[in-house]
Image: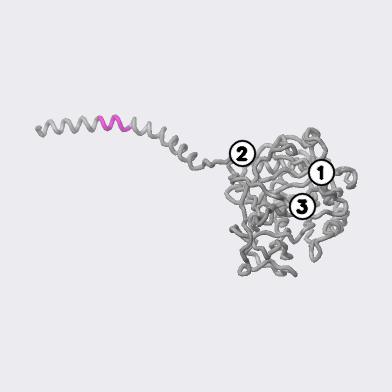
Amino acid sequence: MTRYRRRKITAVVKICVLLICPVVIAVSAKCIPKIKVFFDRMGSISIDNNAESTTVTAVTETTVQTTTKEKDSRTSEGDGKKEEKEDSTDVLTETENPLDVVSENAGDKPYPSENSWTAGGSIVRTTYGKYSGNSFFDLDNGGQVNNQTSIPNETLLSESRCGADFTVEDTSEPLVLIYHTHTTESFEPYVRDFYDANFNYRTTDETKNMIMVGNAIQAELEAQGIGVIHAKEIHDYPSYNGSYGRSRETILPILEQYPSIKVVLDIHRDAVSGEGVAYQPFVEVNGKEAAQIMIISGCDDGTLGMPDFMKNFHFACRLQERLENDYSGFTRPILFDYRHYNQDLTTGSLLIEVGSHGNTLEQVQYSGQLIGNSLGRLLNSMKEGN
């Protein structure tokens, strides 16, 4: 092949390349983003038969046994508009891991030191999904109710559509009272396989008990301009019996002093366990583990002195829906049962179980933040003009 001919072929090839390159670039510009989206979606897919939001990752549900809370002397055993879902990525107040916080006064029953933990039964990590059965029904805008009374589900569903039976004003006076009948209830130090059989999950150290959870709720409410009174008295130590009577003595003068208070929350933890097993009910919310919670709204069978019990239930439904709109899968069904729990004092009185004894300190602190954030949103949405 002559040099002239080689040059001619080379020139033709260069011309073809110059003509084809713009076409290749144009096609690539359209295809690359689609390819990226495809791989991004593949990376975010998780198999989850329970949760409805990608902010919550569920694990296998486990059948559990729930322990009965202390009875007080009068307890038998035993706005309705849909709110728009807001951005689920919340800016919460900064917190320090409660395990790293050293109490100035741990009291008579301090939290166990790290080198004193022993291995007992197993801790089972689980996430409760949607419940089925005759006692359960769905709320219109998220969450469920576990009806343990003789009131028909159809009647309760109709009642659940009522708005809260109190108004909220834009005021600097306190709107919320937080207290703890079982103040010393406590939790696991961190995620692990076994619980300590020698620890009864009670401590007077307020950096490791229910006061810590109440502090987290309070901080989020105050960050949204909601006034809070947090009663930190210990009501269940040294004596557990009579706790509800003692907590009642604490909150009655507070309610008398601050008639502006509309919501009264008794913050507890549950004790979900089986033979040799403690359960750790949790969900992942925005990349962080939170203990699942349960609202208890008491019903009166005619012997408990709570004529306005249904008004508390109305508010319980509003809060449950708000929590589920903000953090899908965060709540267990509202327990509606014949229980008193000092819920005769306001029309916004509820008991909230934050996790169980198998949950960790950090998980329940985060749950407190989520509760406070959603409750603050709900109360601000109820203010006149909003």
Q: Nearer the viewer, residue 29 or 31?
A: 31
Q: Give the residue type that dot 3 points to.
A: Thr
Q: Give the residue type that dot 1 points to.
A: Asn
Position above or below: 89 against 123: above
**Residue at the image point whose x is 62% and y is 49% from the top:** 126
The magenta-colored residue range is: 16-21
Q: Is residue 336 in view from this perspective? A: yes
Q: Give the residue type that dot 2 points to.
A: Glu
Per the image, label 2 sits on a secondary structure element best described as: loop
Q: Nearer the viewer, residue 129 or 366?
A: 129
Magenta stretch: dominant secondary structure: helix
Query: How far from the left and from the top, in percent, is residue 291?
Result: 65, 51
Which label is found at residue 52?
2
Q: Which numbered disc flags the more N-terminal residue, 1 or 3?
A: 3
**Residue at the image point whose x is 88% and y is 45% from the top:** 306
**Residue at the image point whose x is 76% and y is 38% from the top:** 385
Per the image, label 1 sits on a secondary structure element best described as: helix
To which residue does mark 3 refer?
Answer: 68
Q: Which numbered disc flags the more N-terminal residue, 1 or 2?
A: 2
Per the image, label 3 sits on a secondary structure element best described as: loop
Tell me the distance, in whole angstroms, between the alpha carbons under discs 2 and 3. 30 Å
Q: Nearer the viewer, residue 348 or 299?
A: 299
Question: Does the stretch in magenta take in 116?
Answer: no
Identify the image quadrant of residue 202: bottom right
Q: Is residue 97 in view from this perspective? A: no
Position above or below: 83 against 67: above
Instruction: Give the colouring mode of the picture.
Output: one colour
Query: How far from the left and from the top, in percent, is residue 208?
Result: 69, 62
